[in-house]
């Protein structure tokens, strides 16, 4: 009974979001490399832990969340929820993060990237999303030079890939958006995963650290099973003389989003807000 109640509430939540916010589908025609037909995201109702999960995305999109005009700061963030590239923790690491960013004055775009197990498709999706946001920056009153990316867990992996592989052409151009850069202006990695998959737990080989890599904020806890990702990424950025700020708490685990009651979830928003103010000041 609880499972059916959760499914009903989740569907009501999706309907409410669709009515209150804009959904922008990334691929007007065929989704590159996708074999399945375009369909709405599939809800995973196998857990009863107050997290809205998507188990399949075949029609990638960004959902737009706008701040109060009185607090708008002219900057934007594309948010990549986590889920091991298998699911998307869509509210915990997506829409709830968007609400927090709105309070800081950011326009927020929650990315529904392809799952399950479509890492290359996910990279295409985030690159296309950043280009679309940049192309439509006037519409949203955004400075095109202040569009960042932010990710959690596997979404942190995807954000790191977007921040290092922006010169890699992963799909054939679709429209004028694809003539623009997909390089993020800044990057936030919150308990990122899969960044230490090189030999002997070194930096994942595909993450090429050129001088164009944007400033990076990283938050992790020492008892996180993926904690080495943050250390390896921060060390590699430091060695390359690139801008990085790392925070490591002793405890906190993994997958906490910013829900109250956990010290890690209550700490990273404070630290990242200070960092954002520093790097975005004119």
Image: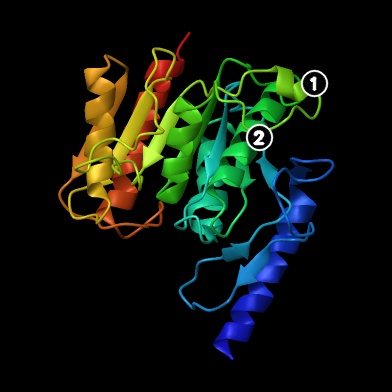
Q: Earlier in the sequence, mark 2 or mark 1?
A: 2
Which residue is the site of mark 1?
176
In the image, residue 207 sits, relative to residue 17, either above or below, namely: above
| Alpha-carbon span between mark 2 and mark 1 | 13 Å
Nearer to us in this view, 203 or 189: 203
Residue in the image at 67% along x and 67% along y = 42
Let me know if residue 136 appears in the view: no
Name the secondary structure under disc 2: helix
Residue in the image at 50% along x and 43% along y = 100
Residue in the image at 63% along x and 29% along y = 130
Name the secondary structure under disc 1: helix
Find the residue positioned furthest to the left. 250
The quadrant of the picture occupied by the N terminus is: bottom right
Task: Tell me where residue 276 sits by quadrant.
Answer: top left
Query: How far from the left and from the top, in percent, is residue 92?
Result: 49, 57
Find the residue positioned furthest to the bottom. 1
Classify residue 262 as left or right of residue 173: left
In the image, residue 97 sits, relative to residue 176, either above or below, namely: below
Find the residue positioned furthest to the front. 199
Task: Tell me where residue 15 sits by quadrant.
Answer: bottom right
> Tag on residue 6?
none
Query: How far from the left and from the top, in percent, is residue 179?
Result: 72, 17
Classify residue 5 as left or right of residue 266: right
What crowding class fits label 2: few (fewer than 14 Cα within 10 Å), some (14-19), or many (20 or more)? many
Query: How far from the left and from the top, in percent, is residue 105?
Result: 56, 30
Nearer to us in this view, 263 or 64: 64
Query: How far from the left and from the top, in percent, is residue 206?
Result: 41, 33
Which residue is the site of mark 2?
129
What crowding class fits label 1: few (fewer than 14 Cα within 10 Å), some (14-19), or many (20 or more)? few
């Amino acid at each position: 009974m609880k499972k059916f109640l959760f499914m009903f509430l989740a569907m009501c939540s999706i309907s409410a979001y669709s009515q209150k916010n804009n959904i922008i589908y990334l691929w007007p025609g065929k989704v590159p490399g996708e074999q399945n037909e375009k369909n709405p995201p599939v809800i995973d109702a196998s857990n009863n832990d107050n997290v809205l999960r998507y188990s399949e995305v075949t029609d990638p999109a960004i959902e737009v969340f706008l701040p109060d005009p009185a607090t708008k700061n002219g900057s934007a963030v594309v948010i990549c929820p986590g889920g091991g590239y298998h699911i998307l923790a869509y509210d915990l690491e997506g829409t709830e993060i968007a609400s927090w960013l709105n309070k800081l004055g950011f326009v927020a775009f929650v990315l529904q990237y392809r799952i399950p197990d479509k890492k290359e498709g996910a990279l295409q999706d985030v690159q296309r999303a950043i280009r679309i946001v940049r192309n439509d920056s006037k519409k949203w009153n955004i400075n095109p030079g202040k569009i960042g990316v932010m990710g959690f867990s596997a979404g942190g992996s995807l954000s790191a890939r977007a921040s290092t592989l922006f010169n890699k052409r992963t799909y054939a151009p679709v429209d004028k958006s694809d003539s623009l850069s997909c390089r993020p202006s800044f990057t936030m990695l919150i308990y990122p995963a899969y960044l230490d998959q090189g030999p002997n737990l070194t930096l994942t080989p595909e993450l090429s650290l050129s001088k164009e890599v944007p400033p990076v904020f990283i938050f992790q806890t020492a008892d996180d099973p993926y904690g080495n990702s943050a250390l390896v990424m921060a060390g590699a950025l430091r060695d390359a003389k690139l801008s990085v700020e790392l925070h490591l708490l002793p405890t906190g685990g993994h997958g906490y989003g910013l829900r109250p009651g956990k010290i890690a979830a209550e700490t990273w928003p404070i630290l990242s807000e200070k960092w954002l103010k520093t790097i975005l000041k004119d």
